[in-house]
Every structure is written in structure tokens, then in C-alpha cells.
Image: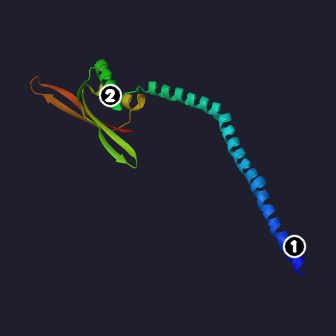
Amino acid sequence: MTNNKQKNIVLIIGFTLVLMLCYQLAINKTFQQKKQFNTLSQEALLFKNGSKQLSLLKQKEVYYDSLLTKYQLDGSSIQNNLLKVINAFANKNNLKVISFLEPHKIAKNNLVIKTYGFILEGDYNSINKLIYQLEQQTKFGEIINLHFEKKKNFRTGKNYLQASVLLKSFG
């Protein structure tokens, strides 16, 4: 009896050793190859869609460049572009830029709000045309305050119109 019992114990131990050896030599390597196959399949899928994504990104770049040229925004800062547009319009329409202040910056929830303040002098219609151009055609931001004030030049005795403008921009 003991002989059969010993044979069974040796047989069970031998069987477990053979199972562990098979796992190490064959099954474990199969699992590693399966993982490697899955990662390579995902990379191949990414490379397959890469040309489509590249063409979409190029189309987006062309579109955004056209928006920048349409709204007269080149590579320099918004403040420089705003001043350039105001000066160009003022030269054409007999307006004077009395002052152009540094932007006031406010940060809220990772969003920077800049407020540009400037004072214009000229006739009512020209100032309104400039305000329309700034808000609708160039898209620098929105006019949050426009204050007209009639003043008198005591040396010449003539009246003139001044407009204080506040323009809010996000960026």
C-alpha cells in the first residue's frame, strides 16, 4: 500500500512540475506574444489613420489662416493690431486718437479678459462707423462702454465731440 501511495505522490508532484514547466515554456510566451500583437495592431491602426488626420489638420490650418487674414489679425499682438486698425480708419475719416491706454487684464477661471480703453475725437458718424468696424468686421471684441462728450475749445470757441471707448477682448 505504501508503495502505491508513494507512486501517487510522486506522480502528482511530477504532474504539477510538468504543468509549471509547460506554463513557463509555452503558455507564458503565448500570452506575451498576444499582448505584443494587440499593441502592434493598435499602432498599425493609428498609422493607417495618420494620413487622414494630417490632411484634416492641414485643412484646419488653411481655414484658421483665412480667418486671421479676414479679421485682420496677423502675428503681432491684439493691442498692436487694434491700434493699427484704429489709426488707419482715423486717417481715412478725419478722426483723432487722443489716447490709447494699456489694456486692463482680469483673470477668471483660466480665462484672461483684456479691456482696452481709448479716446477718439471727431464727428458722430465717423466714430460710429469705427465702432461698427471694430465690433462687426474685425472681431477684436465687444464694445462694453461708449461715452460721448461734447467739449468746447475756449481758444477757438468751437465745439467738438469726444468718445471714450472700452473694448473687451478674451484671450
CA–CA distance in space, label 1 to label 2: 94 Å
- Which sits in the foreground, 73 or 92? 73
Based on the displayed image, in which of its 4 quarters is residue 102 positioned?
top left
Q: How is the image coloured?
A: rainbow
- Which sits in the foreground, 171 or 2? 2
In the rendered structure, the answer to whether residue 160 lies left or right of residue 16 reads left
Q: Position of residue 68 (x, y in %)?
A: 45, 27
Q: Position of residue 119 (x, y in %)?
A: 24, 32
Q: Which mark is residue 129?
A: none
Seen at 43% across and 27% down, the residue is 71
Query: Is residue 39 among what the camera can see?
Result: yes
Seen at 77% across and 58% down, the residue is 23
Seen at 69% across and 41% down, the residue is 40
Q: Position of residue 125 (x, y in %)?
A: 31, 26
Seen at 81% across and 61% down, the residue is 18
Based on the displayed image, in which of its 4 quarters is residue 142 positioned?
top left
Residue holding disc 1: 7
Inspect the image, locate mark 1, and give the three-letter code of the amino acid beneath it: Lys
- Which sits in the foreground, 69 or 125? 69
Residue holding disc 2: 80
